[in-house]
Image (cartoon, rainbow, N blue to C red):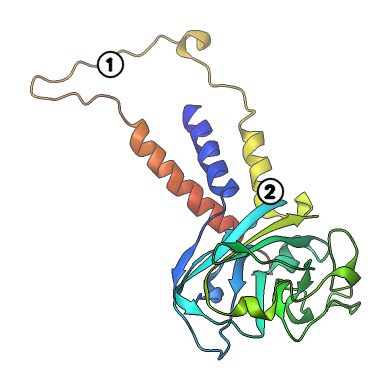
Amino acid sequence: MKLKLLIAAAAAAVTISAAGLSAFAAQDTGAFADGTAYLNLNKIDWTDFQAEYNNAEIIGNGTYTVSMTASEAVDLGQFNALEIINGEEDFGSEYTVTIDSVRINGKEKRSAESYTCSADGDAVTTRVNIYNEWNDPDGAENSAGVPDCRSADGDIASKSARIISADDLVGIKSLEVTFTVSGIKESNSDLAESAVNTAEQETEAPEETAAESGEAPSEEAPPAENETKVPATGNVPAAVMVFAMAVSGVTAAVSGKRK
């Protein structure tokens, strides 16, 4: 029973965390699991630049943070956005992502409100523009046949695809974006379903002790003369193995999505 509780606690610790994923240089989004939120940033000359990224794994409604720290100051170009891999497929075309804060080089720079859409209207990956010179919110439908642009308050007209100014794109050493996810239904999140299943398993009746079952307690054989008896410290390696199991289990739940 203690081991089961430890498994549940480790799994919860993994899923509730921001699931930081760091990568040096350009990010390989093709290797990202479904539900990974990341910064899609581009230099003004569209060349690669070295940076360390911290991404977030979306597991349900809540507030998350992603960030980028460049090896040297860069000037960003005409398109930069927050994106969530397969967010439209996983969470539906009704949930919203609202950017609460954009901190550049440690200073708050958000000057307009954001809106949620799908990347290129494909109803697959979710996009929230940070600075996009080519887009503005409109009433167009995505490939799923529903309005593509949406916001948590329903007021699309007041939102912008450029929530920071062009001047803010120059000399960026660090960029941190905090955002709030809302409107995800439990049925649209495999990780939420997994958490429910784990909770249900923990409600099972406790195991019977030998005294309660009427069985005689087993006697432990004495150690041989040349045998050294090791103290029962198995909980430490067990915790390490359980944490690894929790990490691999959550990753499998996210990456093994139906397409």
Q: Which residue is mark 2?
A: 192
Image spot of residue 123 (x, y percent): 77, 74
Residue closest to the eye, 179 or 182: 179
Instruction: Mark yes or no: residue 121 visible.
Output: yes
Question: Eyeballing the image, is 69 above or below 226?
Answer: below
Q: Residue 235: which quarter of the image?
A: top left
Instruction: Mark yes or no: residue 59 visible.
Output: no
Residue closest to the eye, 47 or 162: 162
Q: Residue 157: which quarter of the image?
A: bottom right
Q: Residue at x 78, y 72 (%)?
A: 117
Badge 2 amino acid: Ala
Q: Which mark is residue 158?
A: none
Dot 2 or dot 1, earlier in sequence: 2
Question: Eyeballing the image, is 8 above or below 104?
Answer: above
Q: Is residue 91 left or right of residue 151?
A: left
Badge 1 amino acid: Glu
Mark 2 element type: helix
Image spot of residue 151 (x, y percent): 84, 64
Label 1 CA crowd tier, 10 Å (few <14, some 14–19, many 20+):
few
Q: Is residue 14 left or right of residue 238?
A: right
Label 2 CA crowd tier, 10 Å (few <14, some 14–19, many 20+):
some
Cβ atoms under marks 2 and 1 closer than 8 Å: no
Q: Is residue 116 left or right of residue 166?
A: right
Q: Which residue is mark 1?
A: 220
Q: Residue lying furthest bottom in this view?
A: 45
